[in-house]
Amino acid sequence: MAAEATLTIENKTGIHARPASIFVQTATKFKSKVQIEAKGKKVDAKSILMIMSMGLVKGTEIKILADGPDEADAVNALKELVESKFGEE
């Protein structure tokens, strides 16, 4: 069974290069398949190019989905990262 969390991007600058890099580094620590769903698209959360291509700005609602042996831990770690505004504010 997959784990998921729905969040809103709160940091002023959205997910630009630095937060995307941190997000990908965090996602790749987990064995589970991790994806982000937003604006009707679903992309691999372990690919910085895919995340950057989504244009995630402040106020965008995203869903973090994980499926695998450590799915709950993956979703929780990424959720905390988004909620902390990637340490930018």
Image (cartoon, grey):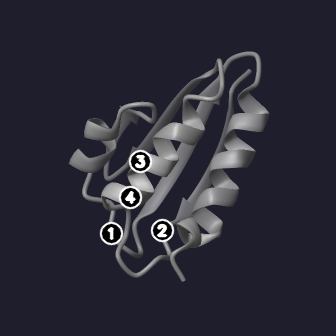
Name the residue tied to disc 1.
Answer: 57
* Label 2 vs 4, first from the N-terminus: 2
Residue at point 72% right, 28% down?
71
Q: Residues within 10 Å of mark 2 (few under 14, many from 20)?
A: some
Residue type at mark 4: give it: Arg
Name the residue tied to disc 2.
Answer: 9
Apparent side of residue 82 relative to residue 72 in the rendered image (left or right): left
In front of the other: label 1 or label 3?
3
Residue type at mark 1: give it: Val
Element under disc 3: helix
Q: Residues within 10 Å of mark 4 (few under 14, many from 20)?
A: few
Residue type at mark 3: give it: Ser
Report the front residue among 54 and 22. 22
From mark 1 to mark 4, how far is it between C-alphas?
13 Å
Asked if labels 4 and 1 touch by Cβ distance under 8 angstroms, the answer is no
Q: Which mark is residue 21?
A: 3
